Image (cartoon, rainbow, N blue to C red):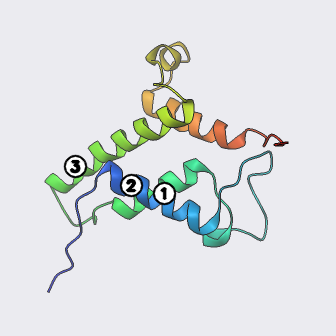
Amino acid sequence: MPHRRIAATPARILTAAADHIERVGLYQGDHLWQPGRMGDTAPCTVLHAWERGVRSARPRWSVRGEPWNVFHRALADSLVVLSNHINGRPVSGVRWRKLRLTEDAYRRTLLWCWGDEPVKNMV
């Protein structure tokens, strides 16, 4: 019997990202690249966790048609939801147009920069 995959949804992508963060931890700060701690066991950034979620929802390359349309919509929607959440409010389109970036590139950069922000000491 062939393996049937569940259709890609933004919730599936974000759940897989959250599961990855829960399993390996979230790392934020100046030294994102950690020699000797690469792979599935190193703490990751939000961008890396989101990309892991995307990979978990991606249809097989041999599949044609509808699953890819659904996947691309889920990919875009999950990136919007996550970047808006990280930003604390909806991301304004004025910003990426001023920087001459695509919306996708700006939102990914936003996730990367948030992860690169130094951790503030909590007292």
Residue 62 position (above or below residue 46): below
**CA distance for labels 1 and 2:** 6 Å
Within 10 Å of disc 3 (Cα), the crowding (few <14, some 14-19, many 20+) is some
Q: From the top left corner, tell me how far across and down residue 21 is, in percent.
A: 57, 60
Residue 120 position (above or below residue 58): above
Q: Going 55% across and 30% down the picture, which residue do you hit?
A: 87
> Badge 3 is on which residue?
70
Quadrant of the snapshot with the C terminus:
top right
Q: Residue furthest bottom?
A: 1
Within 10 Å of disc 1 (Cα), the crowding (few <14, some 14-19, many 20+) is many
Q: Is residue 121 left or right of residue 61?
A: right
Numbered badge on residue 52 = none
Secondary structure category for the residue under label 1: helix
Give the image quarter of residue 57: bottom left
Within 10 Å of disc 2 (Cα), the crowding (few <14, some 14-19, many 20+) is many
Quadrant of the snapshot with the N terminus:
bottom left
Whichever of labels 3 and 1 marks the residue nearer the N terminus, that label is 1
Mark count: 3
Q: Verify CB contact (< 8 Å) between mark 1 and mark 2.
A: yes
- Give the residue type that dot 1 points to: Ala
- Give the residue type that dot 3 points to: Val
Judged by depth in the image, the label closer to the viewer, 2 or 3, is 2
> Badge 2 is on which residue?
13
> Badge 1 is on which residue?
17
Judged by depth in the image, the label closer to the viewer, 3 or 1, is 1
Q: Going 44% across and 58% down the picture, which residue do you hit?
A: 53
Residue 94 visible here? yes
